[in-house]
Image (tube, helix red, strand yellow):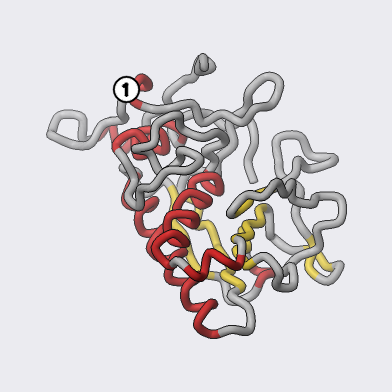
Amino acid sequence: MILRRIRLVLPLAALAVAACDAPTIPPEAEAYDFTFQTTPPSVLRWPVGATIRVHVAGGEDPARAALLREAFLEAAAQWESAVLFGEYRFAEAAAARDADVVLFWSGDPVPADTVGCPPEISGARAVTWSCPHPTVPGRLRPFTVDGEPSSIRMMVFVQRFEANDPAGLKRVVLHELGHVLGIGRHSPNLDDVMEAHAPVDRLSLADRATIQVLYHVEPDILP
């Protein structure tokens, strides 16, 4: 697949430390295609420096809720460690209406209203979805909670049976957070977390290179 031509925008911090052995933005060749399959392909990511607030709606079963929260915390830590200059961070939100992203189990009550923006379910182990804003170009549509406005821009559900395999659950959540951050496609390599069925539980060098390049590309869409 051909990557669209992109322009790297180096932050001031990178320029200030260029004379020493500081991290550098990886070559584009080390990253896989992260664009969304729109026409033309588009780049979606959070603003640099964003705190992405995630509400983990674990449901009424305390054990299952704890598994989902632990999977989120471990995945968030891995993705935060992948970037060079603190381009984003994750934080927990106590309530769905205060979150940017909601993570929940399938079969549990959906924490936000999905009328007009339902998920496309095709037997996947998990689904991350969002919808374009109907009147504001380049933005995502906010979900409502009980009919009231909220800050939710993305929803993620995980199939409930994933609770039977905590290690597999962690791999699934790690993969879905990659989509939340803006990786719009799957890697073709089984060594990468963002391959559709990857059996790995740690970010690869290519995963890291991809997210680093993504967060130094001008976005077409902001949440």
Q: How far across and how far down the image is residue 130, in percent?
A: 70, 47
Q: In this figure, which residue is indicated by the disc labeled 1?
A: 27
Outermost residue, left direction?
20
Q: How far across and how far down the image is residue 222, in percent?
A: 63, 41
Q: Is residue 139 visible?
A: yes
Residue at 55% x, 33% y is 185
Q: How far across and how far down the image is residue 191, in percent?
A: 34, 37
Residue at 80% x, 50% y is 117
- Which image quadrant for residue 43? top right
Q: How far across and how far down the image is residue 179, in percent?
A: 54, 45
| Towards the viewer: 10 or 141 | 141
Residue at 37% x, 29% y is 10
Q: Element type at marker 1?
A: loop
Q: In this view, does 34 lie above or below 45?
A: above
In the image, 142: left or right of 9? right
Q: Is residue 100 visible?
A: no
